[in-house]
Structures are given as structure tokens and as C-alpha cells.
């Protein structure tokens, strides 16, 4: 094999190691669009812990809103109740799904009405020091 080819393969393997170094991945992130007078909305996504250790999601923020809090909807005595969660554990090689009727992100104090098709930036902070910046799609 020619040295130049070996070198480029080495560089390629270095690159792919780096892109897979993050132990967490977020997919299918979206936020519900709002009417002009609406003051809160919800966000949903799937989060996967690709690592061999449990990781805790400790905080979510957005540059476009005053507050983002993690909530869990539960049926209590036939009534739908929301409970605020200060953090969320993600076991090793497991996924947590934020979806309608379960875990969700409650977003309050956004600066503009959220329009379908726009993006909504979110920052997720984790107990292992990792931080993920994502763009959620705004949908109806
Ligand atoms: Cu809620």
C-alpha cells in the first residue's frame, strides 16, 4: 500500500473516532408552534446514552426563552397531572423519549411566537460535563 493512502486512512479513522466520541445523541427534536397570545408550549425529543455509564440530564436552556423545564405527565386518580423534574437519569445504552402525554419540555417566556418551519435552539447539559446544542424544528 502506498504511504499516502495509509496516511489518509489513518486521518479518516481519527476523524470518525472524534465524531463518535460524544456519549449522547438527540434525535427527532421538535417544539409545538404557538398562537400570538400563547405563553407556554412544549418540546419533544429522543435522547440516547451511547456510553457504558449512566448519565443525568441536569438542565435545559434556550437563548429564545426565559425558562425550559422538564415535566412528566401522569394520570393520578383519573386526572392528568404534571410533575416538574429537576433532572433525568439515562441509564447506559438506554433511551429516554420526550413525547406527548409523558416526559416533555415545558417552554415559557419565549421572545417571539413560534412559527411552523422555524428552528428553536436548545442547550442540554449533562452530569458528565457534556453539553449538546440542538435545533428543534417548530411544528404544529
Ligand atoms: Cu408540563
Image (cartoon, rainbow, N blue to C red):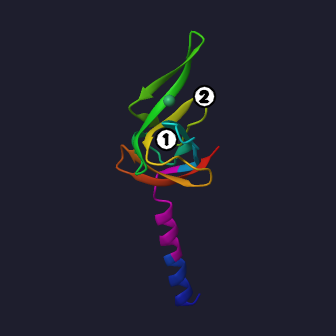
Q: Nearer the viewer, residue 38 or 104?
A: 38
State which region is magenta.
12-25
The secondary structure type at the circle numbered 2 is loop
Cβ at disc 1 under 8 Å from ligand 1: no
Question: Residue 66 got which mark?
Answer: none
Residue at label 2?
101
Q: Residue at x 43, y 27 (%)?
A: 84
* Residue 134 image point, x, y percent: 49, 54
Q: Is residue 2 magenta?
A: no
Position above or below: 7 against 38: below
Image quarter of the N terminus: bottom right
Q: Is residue 24 magenta?
A: yes
Q: Nearer the viewer, residue 2 or 21?
A: 21
Position above or below: 103 against 23: above
Marks 2/1: CA–CA distance:
24 Å
Residue at label 1?
92
* Residue 24 image point, x, y percent: 48, 50
Q: Residue at x 53, y 89 (%)?
A: 4
Q: Residues within 10 Å of mark 1 (few under 14, many from 20)?
A: some
Amino acid at each position: 500500500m502506498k504511504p499516502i493512502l495509509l496516511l489518509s486512512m489513518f486521518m479518516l479513522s481519527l476523524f470518525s473516532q472524534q465524531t463518535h466520541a460524544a456519549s449522547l445523541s438527540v434525535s427527532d427534536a421538535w417544539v409545538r408552534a404557538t398562537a400570538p397570545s400563547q405563553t407556554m408550549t412544549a418540546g419533544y425529543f429522543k435522547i440516547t446514552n451511547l456510553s457504558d455509564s449512566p448519565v443525568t440530564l441536569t438542565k435545559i436552556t434556550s437563548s429564545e426563552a426565559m425558562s425550559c423545564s422538564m415535566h412528566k405527565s401522569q394520570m393520578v386518580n383519573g386526572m392528568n397531572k404534571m410533575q416538574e423534574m429537576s433532572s433525568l437519569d439515562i441509564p447506559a445504552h438506554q433511551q429516554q423519549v420526550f413525547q406527548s402525554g409523558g416526559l416533555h419540555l415545558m417552554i415559557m417566556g419565549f421572545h417571539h411566537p413560534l412559527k411552523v418551519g422555524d428552528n428553536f435552539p436548545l442547550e442540554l447539559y449533562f452530569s458528565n460535563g457534556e453539553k449538546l446544542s440542538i435545533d428543534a424544528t417548530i411544528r404544529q
